[in-house]
Image (cartoon, grey):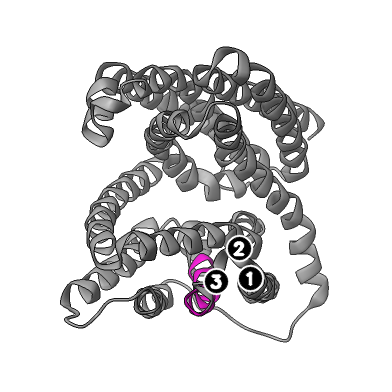
Amino acid sequence: MLRKSLENTAVQIIGKAVMVIISLVTTGILTRKLGATGYGGFVLISSLFVFLDSLADFGTKTIGVREVSRSPEKDLMGHIFNLRMTMTTISFILGLLVVWGWDGLAHFRWEATVALMMIFLTSVGGFMEIIFQSRLRMELKVLMDITFPLTFLIGLWKWSGEITLLWVMTAYVVARAVSLMVGWWLVSGIEKVEFRKLNWTKVKTIWDSSWPMGLFLIIFATYDKAVDSLLIQHFLGPLEVAYYGLAYKIHGVMLQPAYYFVNSIFPILSNRESKTPGLMRTSLVILLVMVAGAMMVVWMLAPWMIYVLGGAEFAPSVGILRTLMWAMLFSYVGHLVGFALIADGGQKEMLKLGIVALVVNLSLNMLLIPRFGVLAAAWVTVFTEMVDMGMMIWFWKNRNRAQ
């Protein structure tokens, strides 16, 4: 089982590398074709949809993988799909209210409206990802994922007419639809999804497990992606945000191998029949070896990474990145214990630790950033990850004692 998980991890890392290359080329073309104003609208719309996508998912993907890995019920996938579509519809309506009611999108209302269709397509893509992940076929997910940006890039490259933001958003929807057709063809080879009469009792059972996870993911996104940057902007200004943002971007990339590995073993952790006593111990050893290598790479290559991505003016980012390196240790272990806790039904405990982490992160950043500068935000991130990991281990051990 672990061998298959390691293969899935490698496939996802390779797929991510390919998509990063495609993204860099696409970004280079878009910035030149759209200009600063048009590209700014593109970034604004994309940022809005990060939140709307989180609301549409609301934990159903993670819980869906767990439940499908546990249960042989043929109609379970159909009920998960119905719940995801319900949450997606709510997210779509909220998105319409924001698009047509917020003055910040006054110049991009029709473009954002077209882009709203992506919420439904992304939700369907997440549904197929549940199937791929629960059946340990992440190579098929990677094929579906790569098809999306590659189709868009080919269309962008071949199009000879004028390229506007409305054209870009329409092309995004079309490219995503193409990738879903490929995904559905791949899914049909491994799973037959049955859509029977809606059983609200089963849907409610899935919802009861999903909503704590959904709230946790929103809280996590708040302190992971927003709090520190907003407070640095408030107390220190945009230049310090740029230094911190570049270092944090690299830090996020270095965490991906841990996510991919734990993502691959999550179905095994969720299936009590296939879970072995030594799975957690072996997985921990693998992750510790991975994080040791990642930390060495960051320490030695931090100056080079910062110079290549930002240039000499971003030299202060080196110290920030080397500080964030210590957060990687707690985060790698936290990934494993956190997913193990969710596999054991501990999503409400995850919500509790998310609330604690948000309060700790917000309080310490407000206290320390004005006194010690941007480096304090990095050390607060390290401390927050340590608190996260410690609480996860405590909750997980308590759960195992009670079972």
Quadrant containing the C terminus is top right
Amino acid identity at mark 2: Leu
Q: Are marks 1 and 3 in contact (CB under 8 Å)?
A: yes
Of 300 and 166, the residue lying toward us: 166
**Residue hosting label 2:** 52
- Tag 3 secondary structure: helix
* In the image, farthest residue toward the top: 372
- Tag 2 secondary structure: helix
Q: Earlier in the sequence, mark 2 or mark 3?
A: 2
Residue 172, image x, y percentages: 38, 73
- Kindly identify which numbered label has been placed on residue 149: none
Q: Quadrant of residue 179?
A: bottom left
Q: Are marks 2 and 3 in contact (CB under 8 Å)?
A: yes
Of 39 and 142, the residue lying toward us: 39
Give the vertical position of 320 relative to 14 (above or below).
Answer: above
Q: Earlier in the sequence, mark 2 or mark 1?
A: 2
Q: Which residues are magenta?
A: 110-126
**Residue hosting label 1:** 95
56 part of magenta stretch: no
**Residue hosting label 3:** 119
Q: Are marks 2 and 1 in contact (CB under 8 Å)?
A: yes
Q: Closer to the observer: label 2 or label 1?
A: 1
Give the vertical position of 96 relative to 35 (above or below).
Answer: below
Residue in view at x 56 percent, y 71 percent? 106
- Tag 1 secondary structure: helix
Give the vertical position of 112 relative to 394 (above or below).
Answer: below
Magenta stretch, main secondary structure, is: helix
125 part of magenta stretch: yes
Quadrant containing the N terminus is top left
Residue in view at x 64 percent, y 67 percent? 102
Of 227 and 92, the residue lying toward us: 227
